[in-house]
Amino acid sequence: MRNLYESVTKLDHRCYDIYQLPEDILMEHAAYAITDQIKERFEPGAKVLIVAGPGNNGGDGVACARQLLGEYDVHLFMPYGAKSSMCKLQLERFYACGGELSENLTDADIVVDALFGSGLSEPLNEESQHIITRLNELQSFKIACDIPSGIDSKGNPLPVAFVADLTITMGAMKLSLFMDLAKDYVGKVIVADLGISSKLYESESDYKLLEESDLKPPYRTRFNSNKGTYGHLALIAGEKEGAAIMAALAALRYGVGLVTLVTCEKIQVPYELMHSSHLPPKTTALAAGMGLGMEYSDEDLEEFLHKDLPMVIDADLFYSSKIQEIVKREKVVLTPHPKEFGALLRNLNLADLSVEEIQRDRIGAAKIFTKAYPEVVLLLKGANPIIAQGEQFFINPLGTNALAKGGSGDILTGLIGALLAQGYDPLEAAIQGSLAHAIASRKVDKANYALAPSDLIEVIGKL
Ligand SMILES: NC(=O)C1=CN([C@@H]2O[C@H](COP(=O)(O)OP(=O)(O)OC[C@H]3O[C@@H](n4cnc5c(N)ncnc54)[C@H](O)[C@@H]3O)[C@@H](O)[C@H]2O)[C@@H](O)CC1
Ligand SMILES: Nc1ncnc2c1ncn2[C@@H]1O[C@H](COP(=O)(O)OP(=O)(O)O)[C@@H](O)[C@H]1O
Ligand SMILES: [K+]
């Protein structure tokens, strides 16, 4: 798990004021992190095009150009010259080392985008848009310095933004790089240490980035155990019972001892699942909402949901008035996708936001909910799901687009339900369920268009 920050300005200032590390030292390290990646990936002599802007993001690029001079075929293009004092200083050093500016954009093995970083403050003018479009067309390996130019501080791409293979972000991970709308632009994201370890550079943060090493599957450690030791998950099956069946199969695969589908009607269920018209008395957690439809009366729902059990709620229940009571309970995880989240916010009279408004400020939208219901765990689905409770926010960047298919969400509900039933607290169940879901999506040995829910269930057994 890594810290994430809205801005690192405060952290940079701590370096100047407390650690006595001036901007020059930080910038030299920032530039070297880019140089290092180029040297690791390309032989000396490779052609490097660096596009540097007028501020300190440009300064990083110019310093990198100087570090590569003599060993690589360096082309430094500066459409707006150097304006910040550090950028000017770097340019003087570049000239002193024999560097010359390029007049044009040129094809290259590697492109470094150091046009704008955290200082992007206005819409891109036509020239910048043209430059970025041209860079995006090149077949080069593309590195973004700090943040791809054209992505704003909330992670929203302007109409034109640089598409990187690798983003080297300076000092610490930024929230903006892990918003859904930025996912097609950032490529792989790595952090550059700026001459000081991350332990000293970073301060506490309420925002965390989940990593593969955070996954802790529910391995069994007790030898003297029986099915009851591992909990009993009840899933309410509704109009589209397939959704609850998939969730139930995922739950069984993720370690829960007993799984029962609860339904008003007699349905065919796979032989490994149980089936009942009542909530089993020893139920340890509930999952409800997926495929529920509108066939249940409030009384039916009351019968199934009356106990104060840990529960994960999904899909159709976000549209039901029942949710107004559920969010007041303890041990609740909600797993809406953005459209369902909009409905939930309206249902609770918290806000009236469109899907686009939610996606442009996912953290802000999540905060509207967590401020009103700080006990409830919210998992806002998406390309990079956000898991939030109170003031804590976790982002899971590990899932792939293979998950963009009907049924993926049902599997997630099953995984979270399985962990709740096995005694995980709701926040941990949501984090661990989301990690298992995302990591499984990478382990399915199929083309990314081919993933079916059953493939995910299979792989979940081999994490
Ligand atoms: N502060 C520090 O100690 C460090 C800063 N670093 C770098 O510094 C960057 C931030 O530098 P700055 O604050 O100078 O900001 P930037 O370099 O990101 O951008 C500011 C410059 O771009 C111009 N500008 C902004 N938006 C524009 C637009 N849409 N069209 C045309 N011009 C535009 C501004 O007028 C200003 O000249 C970081 O992203 C990072 O790359 C790193 O060197 C690490 C250390
Ligand atoms: N492009 C993507 N990258 C990563 N994860 C994704 C992507 N698209 C969808 N997912 C994940 O897949 C699941 C889809 O859930 P949902 O939209 O509820 O689908 P369904 O209701 O059909 O099961 C969510 O967990 C979401 O985070
Ligand atoms: K940049």
Image (cartoon, grey):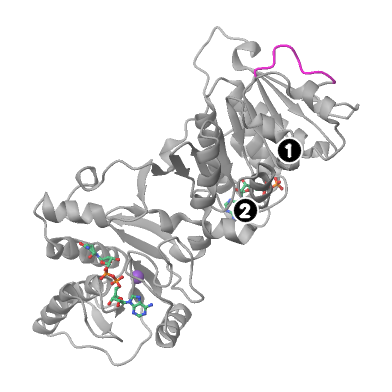
Callout 2: CB less than 8 Å from ligand 2? yes
Residue at coordinates 85% horizontally, 38% vertically from top-left?
239
Q: Which residue is mark 1?
A: 317
- The x, y position of residue 185, in whole percent, is 47, 66
- Horizontal arrangement in the rendering, residue 169 relative to residue 135 (left or right): left
**Whether residue 82 can be seen here:** yes
Residue 108 is a magenta residue: no
Query: Pointer 1: residues within 10 angstroms few (<14), some, or many (20+)?
Result: many
Q: Which residue is mark 2?
A: 402
Amino acid on which disc 2 is placed: Ala
**Whether residue 385 can be seen here:** no
- The x, y position of residue 439, in whole percent, is 53, 43
Q: Is residue 319 above or below residue 160?
A: above
Q: From this viewpoint, which residue is outermost toward the top?
A: 224
Q: Quadrant of the N terminus?
A: top left
- The x, y position of residue 315, in whole percent, is 71, 42
- Horizontal arrangement in the rendering, residue 90 relative to residue 165 (left or right): left
Tag nearer the camera, 2 or 1: 1
Q: Which residues are magenta?
A: 277-284
Query: Pointer 2: residues within 10 angstroms few (<14), some, or many (20+)?
Result: some
Q: From this viewpoint, which residue is outermost toward the front?
A: 349
Residue at coordinates 76% horizontally, 15% vertically from top-left?
280
Residue 281 is a magenta residue: yes
> Nearest the camera: 136 or 278?
278
> Nearest the camera: 140 or 267?
267
Amino acid on which disc 1 is placed: Leu
